[in-house]
Structures are given as structure tokens and as C-alpha cells.
Image: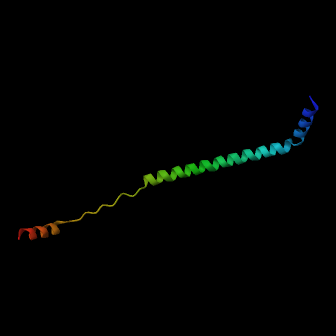
């Protein structure tokens, strides 16, 4: 090995614990991020499904127009 490679290897070996610790932290952050995004997606889908399933039925009203129709008929007959 050339002296350059030997020096680089020694430097990497000296910092190996820091490098491994940093890699573990990055991996943990990625996993936490994935869990948060997955949970947010599940909650969003759940609320969407809940909203679709539990929509209130539209209210309908029935109006009896018999009296008004009789009144209009009595006006037009005379």
C-alpha cells in the first residue's frame, strides 16, 4: 500500500466509532421519519374513509299544497 492509503486507513480507523455512530443516528432518523409519514398517511386515509361512510343523509321535507291549490282554483273559477 502506498503511504497515502496507509494514512487514510489509519484516519478512518481512528474515526470509525464516530462514523458508525453517525450512520446509526441517520438510520434511526430515517426510520422515525418513515414511521411518522406512514402514520400520517394511515390517519389521512382513515379520516377520508370515515367521512365517506358517515355522511348524513340529506333532509327532505314534504309540503302539503292542497289548501293553496284550492284557493287558486277558487280564484280562477269566478
**Could you say which is closer to the camera, residue 46 or residue 10?**
10
Specify how the rendered protein is coloured: rainbow
Taking the image as shown, residue 45 lies to the left or right of residue 21, namely left
Q: Position of residue 2 (x, y in %)?
A: 92, 30
Q: Residue furthest left?
A: 78
Taking the image as shown, residue 43 lies to the left or right of residue 26, namely left
**x 30%, y 61%: residue:** 60
Name the image quarter holding residue 9. top right
Q: Position of residue 36 (x, y in %)?
A: 63, 50
**x 36%, y 57%: residue:** 57
**Could you say which is closer to the camera, residue 33 or residue 50?**
33
* 18 lies above or below 4: below
Q: Residue furthest top?
A: 1
Q: Position of residue 41 (x, y in %)?
A: 57, 49
Q: Position of residue 33 (x, y in %)?
A: 66, 49
Give the position of the C terminus as an image quadrant: bottom left
Name the image quarter holding residue 16. top right
Taking the image as shown, residue 24 lies to the left or right of residue 58, namely right
Q: Residue furthest right?
A: 3
* 70 lies above or below 46: below
Give the position of the N terminus as an image quadrant: top right
**x 10%, y 67%: residue:** 73
Taking the image as shown, residue 69 lies to the left or right of residue 78, namely right
**x 33%, y 61%: residue:** 59
All told, the count of numbered labels is 0
Amino acid at each position: 500500500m502506498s503511504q497515502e492509503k496507509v494514512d487514510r486507513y489509519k484516519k478512518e480507523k481512528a474515526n470509525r466509532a464516530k462514523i458508525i455512530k453517525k450512520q446509526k443516528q441517520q438510520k434511526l432518523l430515517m426510520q422515525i421519519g418513515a414511521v411518522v409519514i406512514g402514520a400520517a398517511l394511515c390517519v389521512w386515509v382513515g379520516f377520508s374513509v370515515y367521512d365517506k361512510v358517515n355522511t348524513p343523509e340529506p333532509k327532505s321535507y314534504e309540503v302539503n299544497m292542497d289548501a293553496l291549490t284550492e284557493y287558486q282554483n277558487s280564484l280562477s273559477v269566478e
